[in-house]
Amino acid sequence: MSAALPVQGSAPAEKWLITMAVMIPTLIEVLDTSVANVALTHIQGSLSAGQEEATWVLTSYLVANAVVIPMSGWLARALGRKRYLVSSLVLFTVSSLLCGAAGSLFQLILFRIVQGIGGGGLQPMSQAILMETFPPHQRGMAMALYGMGVVLGPILGPLLGGWLTDNLSWRWIFYINLPVCAVALLMIQAFVHDPEHMERRQSGERVDYIGLALLTVGIGALQIVLDKGQQDDWFEANYILVLAIVSGISLVSLVLWELTQEKPIVDLRIFKNRSFASGNVVIFLGFFAFFGSIVLLPLFLQGLMGYTAFLSGLVLGPGGAVMLLIMPLTGKLTEKVDARFLLLFGLLLSAFALWHMSGFNLFIDFDTAVGARVIQGVAMPFFFVSLSYLTFAWVPVAQMNNASSIFSLLRNLGGSFGTAFVTTMLARRAQFHQARLAETMSTLDPGFSYAMDKIKENLGYALGTFQDHTQRAYVLIYKQLAREASTMAFSDAFLSQAWLFLLLIPLILIMKKPPSGKRFQAGGGH
């Protein structure tokens, strides 16, 4: 049974104004998840904080964000979607001002929590509005526009944060939000309206307080575990172990509880839709691999190749520009080509890009690094746009808010899990390779003896032949060994992410063929 899809803006101009109105807050919210990363050392010095304390500036925002995202569909039903979107944006704007003016680390962390609460609803509500603003055959284009903010935000965030911090002050990474959010507020008030079909909370309807508590505790504890785990050696730290247990119990209880509720905080019954269910698995694991590579490449370039933060940003930049150009093209292709084939191409090309990165060594040039990122920049629009289109193709319009909230949560959690995985894998695999390479560091090994003699000979030319340079030679060889071990660890991590993309291919078979062509303008749900 088809459900008619109301389009908010009948005139093309109004449709694009609505798009701009909801895309601005999405981009600025995604930027704020990563914009503060490069400013932590400046924040430490300014607020007299330790390194570990300062990282809570990042964690507090991510935790608050992760908790609010899945309940944003329920909040939209309770408050009205436009009212909730405006309230979230106002809260985000005011807290951004307070973050910039914070006089202590405690104040900054507190205001970052408020900022995360305000920002949590911006992504899913923007996605839901776009899906309803465009007719079904143009949903791919809607997701292409949405994807520009979601995919480019994590890339542009560190670049913008670094530039503002170096040229103005770390406080400007928050102040910059104010004029942008003000424009977005004016545009939302003028052009965005709640659709008549949207389900509203009925007067006297019971609030699912148990579901709300389980969701808050479960997601909040999980996000802290993911963000702090590697830093504190995972389950070797008692608080990480306790939080992991609390999160597991809370989330399992949440699933069991919500399935019995008539009006749950998060309606999990939507997972009966096979395209939506498989699409959420793919977005979780796909962003697991994608965000992992976004973390890995700058670490490789700066940690092993000696690139500056700015030069590392220049490597990422062309890939982001390519994404920006190809997103609309991919959206247009979904109107003419089965999106499952586009998704297959995106998965294969993403895997190839990461396989190419797994071959990086300590002698790659700038163009090689940029080339790998450009390949990934071509792949990601095909992956994200076609997947979003397939996932939401058969979601009834009345469920769009709830579906967008779940999809956004799993996308963000995928990125958090991916980041935690690759940082842990780098540390463990570097130790493994270092131990294996160190086995040959013996004078009984001809290659090692030859290298030692050559290094001592060169040190003799540089420092004088009347000294014993054996110890210095050992130090130099060990440093090179550590770099080689780290390079091999990066190769392992890139390769594991490539395999992950390939393993997602069978899930395409589960997805239903999406509607295509203008004859489906009245479709889009069932």
Image: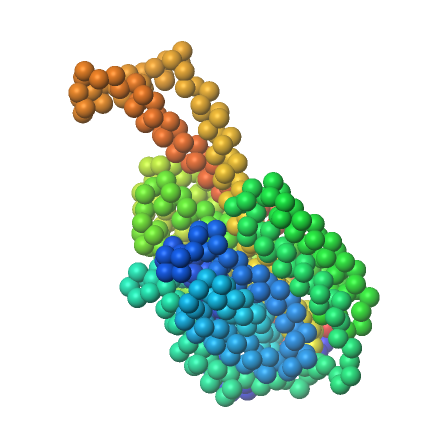
Quarter of the picture containing the C terminus is bottom right
Q: Say if residue 283 shows up in the picture.
A: no
Residue found farthest to the top = 444
Residue 16: x percent and y percent? 48, 80
Look at the picture and state if 170 lies above or below 471.
Answer: below
Q: Identify the image quadrant of residue 437.
A: top left
Rendered image coloring scheme: rainbow
Which residue occupies 58% across, 51% down?
226
- Image quadrant containing the N terminus: bottom right
Q: Measured along the vertical axis of the image, is residue 155 above or below residue 483?
A: below
Residue 52 in percent (x, y) is at 48, 51
Q: Which residue is drawn at the image coordinates 36% and 46% (left, top)?
A: 302
Q: Residue at x 75, y 83 (%)?
A: 202
Residue 409, can we see it?
yes
Q: Nearer the viewer, residue 473 or 3?
A: 473
Residue 164 occupies which quadrant of the picture? bottom left
| Residue 26 or residue 363, whichever sits in front | 26
Judge by depth and name the residue closer to the eye, 160 or 356.
160
Q: Quadrant of residue 378?
A: bottom left
Out of 366 and 309, give the one closest to the viewer.
309
Check the image and report above or below for 398 versus 418: below
Q: Position of residue 68 (x, y in %)?
A: 61, 68
Q: Residue furthest right?
A: 260
Q: Residue at x 32, y 43 (%)?
A: 306
Residue 238 lies left or right of residue 426; in this view the side is right
For the image, the number of numbered tags is 0
Q: Is residue 391 left or right of residue 14?
A: right
Q: Position of residue 129 (x, y in %)?
A: 58, 77
